Image (cartoon, rainbow, N blue to C red):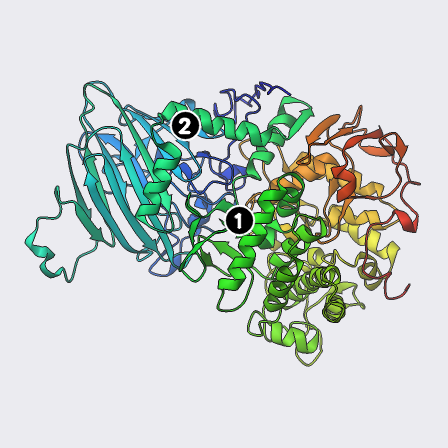
Amino acid sequence: MKHKVILIAMMALTLPVWAQQPVDYVNPIIGTNGMGHTFPGACTPFGLVQLSPDTDTIPHNVNGAYQKNAYEYCAGYQYRDQTIVGFSHTHLSGTGHSDLGDILLMPAVGEVKLNPGRADHPGEGYRSRFTHATEKATPGYYEVMLDDYGIKAQLTATQRVGVHKYTFPKGKNGHLILDLVHGIYNYDGKVLWTNLRVENDTLLTGYRITNGWARTNYTYFAISLSRPIKEYGYKDKEKVLYNGFWRRFNMERNFPEISGRKVVAYFHFDTAEESELEVKVALSAVSTEGAIKNLRAETGGKSFDELAEAARNDWNSELDHFEIAGTPDQKAMFYTSLYHTMINPSVYMDVDGAYRGLDHNIHQAKGFTNYTIFSLWDTYRAEHPFLNLIKPERNADMVQSMIKHEQQSVHGMLPVWSLMGNENWCMSGYHAVSVLADAIAKGVVTNTDEALKAMVSTSTVPYYEGVADYMKLGYVPLDKSGTAASSTLEYAYDDWTIYQTALKAGQTDVAEAYRKRALNYRNVYDTSIGFARPRYSDGTFKKEFDVLQTYGEGFIEGNSWNFSFHVPHDVLGMIDLMGGEKTFIKKLDELFTMHLPEKYYEHNEDITEECLVGGYVHGNEPSHHVPYLYAWTSQPWKTQYWVRHILNRMYRNDINGLGGNDDCGQMSAWYLFSVMGFYPVCPGTDQYVLGAPYLPSLKLKLPNGNTLEIKAPGVSDQKCYVQSLTLNGKPYDKMYVTHDTILKGGVWEFKMSSSPNKRRGLTNEAKPYSLTKGILNK
């Protein structure tokens, strides 16, 4: 199929000119903080480099005191800001905590300034004012005019190289600031050491080591310049207490070896006659030699325009999985979401396969591509299942990267939150086991024994967040962990995935042990109130307990009202614990329609009123499967209603159009699955629970060469209910489909109506997987 030109009509009062520049296949809204802490700069699919503007330098803390505005700069960019500090090469997409912003460049003319200045006094430093009218962002490309300097900045990227093109004003000589202190979520002391070598008049090499969310992050670089340096210098903003015999040199000017903790350098160029300067910045976690190899392999002999076209083609190839029918706004939202699922995880190795492992030794990736940035508490739910469906070869490599992480771990643990060759331990559970189990269940990964060994090791580390007590008592006690109830629920699901994998490996003893552990969720349900509730080591439940409160009640980033539904592997068992089907449906209905008082979220960075549907919190991940739980009841049609409601409310073609952080593609993957009409409620099974299509037609080109066409003629906000479904012309009444069914392709046709078909999907055979048939009704 030839690529289509889709021109997205943007909303003039709220959106910049981004995406008005046509890309062959699609124009996503590249992203801003309003779009879930995403960034607008240039990257390639799953690349190491994300080259993007940073609009301020809010530190994470000052003398240990947290600065609340830092949260707004998780991606480095705020749409409301009026200045750009510079362009840094690494960014996290959609996270609720942050790091990176490595190797910041800023072109300028006039007086050399070595500090960024303040947003309200930009002339104090090297930052520049800009307007959104001159911004352009398409996949793999970003452009803006730096108004204070009259410099046109254009950015593109390869997997490992950020590529800049600066056009200086005629008749003026320009200079380039290289700030090795700058970072996202920065603070005094985050930069442990920097090194910079002027190898010759067009090549710089160096590195910096930072201590942030990634505790020991090595970023090596090689910078190629299209024009020779006329002169250069630097300033170390931290007083050097001992300098040995280096003191014999005047190192601050035209000295080719530069080191320090707070180095900001400048480089002058003759741009008065030839106004363009192209800069290529290659990154490596291994060495400057590795960075040079990456530079030559990916950009050698190629111009900015050639590299920009290559990035554009890379994205066209990736985004071409889908062909959809819909309004311009629907298309913008769909392809924006698809784009965001392919930024993280990120390739983390050099072109020759060398990478820095968790043990900080240099390893060689043999037969796989090594990845980092695994936000697993978020992405096990839909992002990795989505990659299993459309990018199985990539997810197989990600699984192998996780297994290598476990083998390099002194704890013997799979990643919890992997970041740049580091473990940052963010959030709870050990959800990498879910990613492994899901890939195995769907035939993406076949090394079951190796995976199972890593899963068992991970789940038996006694000092990891209550695991010793969990193994002894069957729950995490509140007197030992502030997230006791939610951790118990998460461990029980994770243990079920290990049970499933052990069955596939034929290890029945291991399977039985983890089947029992998978039922531990029962131990934190208080059947007298029908909610999950933390308990103490002596077995008693917490007495004063507020099911709507997030803080201090034994849950992490969620309350009992939402987390009590977190038993995706045994929904029928959960229904019984809540008091039976009628009570369960009533609770679901109430969750979506209740009024949640502002006091329960007003001090929560992650949750705002825009993230809520009643008490259902779509802006945070523990609730993402909840709308699909009606499928296990006698009222499955309610899933069809609420999912469409959430799609309309939480995903809008607007600069503030995403309700919550995108969390490395999880929010976007939820959207894409739900638009298609199914969702992986329980990764680790081969099942997807059915909802209803959002668009009248959609074609998915599957990785095996087949095509799945999903038709829903006349679907709308009014005609949102499924009257009937046929798969390749045959009636289909189940509330789930299998992975193999999807891979076979063909045509699914949904007959839509403005009223629900209350007789569909009611038989036992029509219901999705559940570990048990419930406690009361075995």
Left or right of 212? Residue 760 is right
Say few, some or many: other residues with alpha carbon within 10 Å of mark 1 (under 14 / 14 to 19 / 20 or more): few
Q: How many marks?
A: 2
Quadrant of the image containing the N terminus: top right
Left or right of 161? Residue 625 is right
Say few, some or many: other residues with alpha carbon within 10 Å of mark 2 (under 14 / 14 to 19 / 20 or more): many
The residue located at (66%, 38%) in the rendering is 671
Q: Tell me if I can see residue 249 in this picture.
A: yes
Q: Earlier in the sequence, mark 2 or mark 1?
A: 2
Residue furthest out toward the front: 366
Q: Nearer the viewer, residue 637 or 730?
A: 730
Mark 1 secondary-structure assignment: loop
Q: Nearer the viewer, residue 218 or 331?
A: 218
Q: Nearer the viewer, residue 117 or 40?
A: 40
Amino acid bearing label 1: Gly
Q: Nearer the viewer, residue 119 or 267?
A: 267
- Mark pair 2, 1: CA separation: 27 Å
Residue 367's disc is 1
Q: Position of residue 293 (x, y in %)?
A: 35, 41
The residue located at (13%, 45%) in the rendering is 255
Q: Tell me if I can see residue 426 in this picture.
A: no
Amino acid bearing label 2: Leu
Q: Quadrant of residue 299?
A: top left
Mark 2 secondary-structure assignment: helix
Mark closer to the observer (2, 1): 1
In this view, 694 is above or below 115? above
Residue furthest out toward the left: 248
The residue located at (54%, 37%) in the rendering is 35
Q: Position of residue 396 (x, y in %)?
A: 60, 48
Residue labelled with disc 2: 307
Q: Position of residue 162 (x, y in %)?
A: 38, 36
